[in-house]
């Protein structure tokens, strides 16, 4: 897990030097260790290590969760739902045969994350909680996320920034798995010494900058994702994840889409790369998509409605067209026999 507390920008060491490394043996010890000031969780470290180098976070202690057996692996329930430990690697999820049959959208999202080396190290919890890739943020310019009063992307280099839900910050959320998991209606199980255990619907996990500027999620200091639950209602082959990247491989999504037709006939559609959070299409549009056979004009109208509130910046208007194309393809696929 790469900084699931979501408070990396404000977690700073009071002293100089490298943070201490503390392996946690079990969940109880992990909760106690993470409750200490300046402690952050360490999983694969694929985002945490660069974040430390870039001084986005200056922790006092790195609490290694990778050795905790309760946080690794996939547990299947009799009803067909699955519980994925947050420290399970993306490669392990992608290679799981039962996951490929029951939840292929998640498998595909994991397969398209970064390089093989990153997938072998990166964990599901870390992928969900990684920090945004905005170059102004990563260069530690005094933007909104660093306590400033200015968004440098708004009038600057914004070709990869948000067209939906932006303001005052226009980041896009970088997680591929988050888009797929939202399309499936996942639940995140979170643990903390002071907060105890709590379950959070994935729609309620991510937050827009207008609501919280210092973090991209609702986790508090000392909390970490314990597991991700996938409901049986979303299992089956009528689901998919797709993304468009700038370099064609091993890259973050310029725009992505995930969709699912659930066993009760309901539809869920989610866009990635277009907003500070995974962007779920409005329920009324999902209901229209689920209602039955659609003609070409109907598909175009629904895609246009889904992007009605898009407000592109000076250099990212192309994302509106690209998102529309992905949505139209998804809607056609959802209504195919």
Image (tube, grey):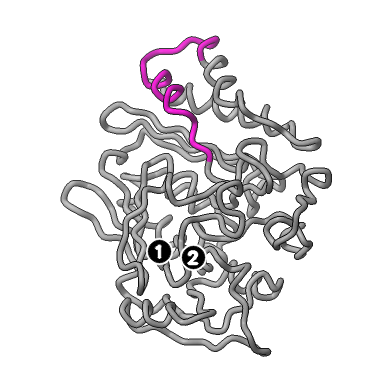
Q: What numbered label is drawn on residue 225?
A: 1
| Left or right: 75 in relation to 247 | left
Residue lying farthest to the right in this orientation: 156
- Which stretch did the figure color magenta? 279-298
Q: Depth check: give the residue in front, 126 or 196.
A: 196
Disc 1 is placed on an element classified as strand
Q: What numbered label is drawn on residue 4?
A: 2
Instruction: Please tell me which residue is depicted at 51% across the width and 80% down the height of the picture.
Output: 37
Instruction: Please tell me which residue is depicted at 62% across the width and 74% down the height of the picture.
Output: 49
Check whether the beta carbons of the residues at disc 2 and disc 1 lie within 8 A of each other.
yes
Residue 293, placed above or below residue 61: above
Residue 201, placed above or below residue 88: above
Question: Neighbour class for label 2 at 10 Å: few (<14), some, many (≥20)?
Answer: many
Q: Earlier in the sequence, mark 2 or mark 1?
A: 2
Residue lying farthest to the front in this orientation: 149
**CA gap, disc 2 and disc 1:** 7 Å
Q: Quadrant of the C terminus?
A: top left
Q: Is residue 308 magenta?
A: no
Residue 318, placed above or below residue 80: above
Instruction: Please tell me which residue is depicted at 48% across the width and 53% down the height of the picture.
Output: 110
Q: Quadrant of residue 222?
A: bottom left
């Amino acid at each position: 897990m790469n900084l699931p507390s979501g408070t990396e920008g404000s977690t700073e060491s009071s002293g100089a030097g490298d943070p201490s490394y503390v392996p946690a043996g079990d969940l109880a010890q992990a909760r106690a260790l993470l409750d200490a000031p300046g402690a952050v969780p360490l999983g694969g470290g694929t985002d945490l290590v660069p974040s430390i180098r870039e001084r986005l976070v200056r922790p006092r202690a790195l609490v290694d969760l990778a050795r905790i057996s309760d946080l690794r692996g996939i547990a299947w329930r009799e009803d067909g739902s699955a519980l994925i430990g947050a420290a399970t690697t993306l490669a392990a999820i992608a290679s799981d045969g039962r996951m490929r049959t029951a939840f292929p959208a998640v498998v595909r999202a994991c397969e398209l994350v970064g390089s093989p080396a990153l997938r072998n190290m990166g964990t599901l919890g870390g992928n969900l909680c990684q920090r945004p890739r905005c170059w102004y943020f990563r260069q530690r310019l005094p933007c909104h996320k660093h306590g400033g009063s200015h968004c440098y992307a708004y009038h600057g280099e914004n070709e990869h920034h948000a067209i939906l839900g932006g303001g005052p910050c226009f980041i896009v959320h970088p997680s591929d798995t988050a888009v797929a998991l939202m399309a499936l209606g996942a639940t995140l199980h979170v643990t903390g010494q002071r907060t105890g255990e709590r379950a959070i619907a994935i729609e309620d996990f991510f937050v827009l900058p207008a609501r919280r500027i210092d973090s991209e999620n609702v986790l508090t200091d000392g909390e970490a994702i314990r597991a991700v639950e996938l409901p049986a209602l979303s299992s089956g082959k009528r689901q998919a994840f797709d993304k468009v990247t700038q370099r064609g491989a091993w890259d973050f999504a310029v725009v992505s889409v995930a969709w699912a037709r659930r066993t009760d006939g309901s539809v869920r559609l989610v866009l990635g790369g277009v907003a500070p959070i995974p962007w779920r299409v409005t329920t009324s549009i999902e209901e229209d998509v689920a209602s039955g056979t659609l003609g070409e004009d109907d598909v175009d109208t629904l895609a246009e409605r889904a992007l009605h509130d898009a407000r592109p910046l000076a250099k990212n208007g192309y994302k509106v067209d690209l998102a529309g194309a992905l949505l139209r393809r998804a809607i056609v696929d959802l209504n195919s026999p």
